[in-house]
Each structure stands twice: as C-alpha cells, then as structure tokens.
Amino acid sequence: MHAPGRSEYRSFAFLAVALRRRYRRNATLRAEVVADGVPYRLTLTPSRAEIARGDMPSPDVRLIGSGASLARLFLSEGAKRRLPADVLAEGSAASVRALLNSFAPSDEGG
C-alpha cells in the first residue's frame, strides 16, 4: 500500500488543512460541510478562511455527504459543475458555487 499523493483523498480532515492554503480570498461566506457525519465549519472572509471541526450555526450553505464525494468537489474543477447524487446541498445555488469556487483544486493555485 502506498501513501496517498497530493491530489488523492485521505480524509476530509486532511483536506480541510489543505483548503486553508488553497483559499482564493474571494468570498464572504459561512458554510458547514458534513463529511461522513462529521461537521466542519468554514468562515470565509476576504482575508482568510477559518476551517474547524464543529457545527456552523445558520450557515449560508451546507453540504452533506460522503467524505470522498465532498473531497472530489474541492479537488476537481470538473466535479464542481454538478453535485454528486450522494451530496445534499442546503442553501442557494449561488452560495454553493461561491463556496466551491473559493478554493483552488491544487496547491499550485490552478
């Protein structure tokens, strides 16, 4: 068994750490992502992304699904076009797009 590569899914907790680096600093949004039953709160401002485990009271958007499906949304530009069947989105379509487009799919900024 090999160690996961940079773009391979490990767990949403690992991805949350990478998302801080990949934040494009272009949104003001409160979001909750529930991956495999574990909630993560994301507070996005023009200067930084705060990402931590825990519930987000009254988020603008909430995504709920398997960690692997949610990770693909953040790691692949192509996956952002349509939510997988096993991902539930609560909030406006514009808020979902704003959340997903706020992060580069890789550390290279692409």
Image (spheres, helix red, strand yellow):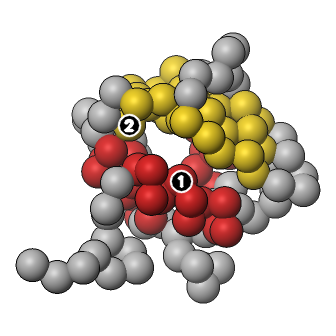
Name the residue beneath numbered marker 2.
35
Q: Residue at x 45, y 50 (%)?
A: 13
Tell me if 35 is positioned left or right of 17 in this view.
left
Q: Which residue is mark 1?
A: 16
Whether residue 73 appears in this view of the structure is no
Side (left or right) of 45 relative to 11:
right
User: In the picture, which quadrant includes the C terminus?
Assistant: bottom right
Q: Nearer the viewer, residue 14 or 106?
A: 14
Distance CA(mark 1)–CA(mark 2): 11 Å
For the point 65% across and 45% down, the residue is 51
Q: Earlier in the sequence, mark 1 or mark 2?
A: 1
Residue shown at the point (38%, 75%) measured from the top left: 7
Secondary structure at badge 2 equals strand
Tell me: residue 29, above or below residue 13. Answer: above
Q: Which residue in the rendered view is the most extreme toward the right? A: 47
Q: In the rendered image of this protein, does residue 92 appear above or below residue 12?
A: above
For the residue pair 11 and 92, the one nearer the viewer reads as 11
For mark 1, does the 10 Å Cα neighbourhood hold few (<14), some (14 to 19), or many (20 or more) residues?
many
What is the x, y in percent for residue 60? 69, 25
Q: Quadrant of residue 29?
A: top right
Image quadrant of residue 104?
bottom right
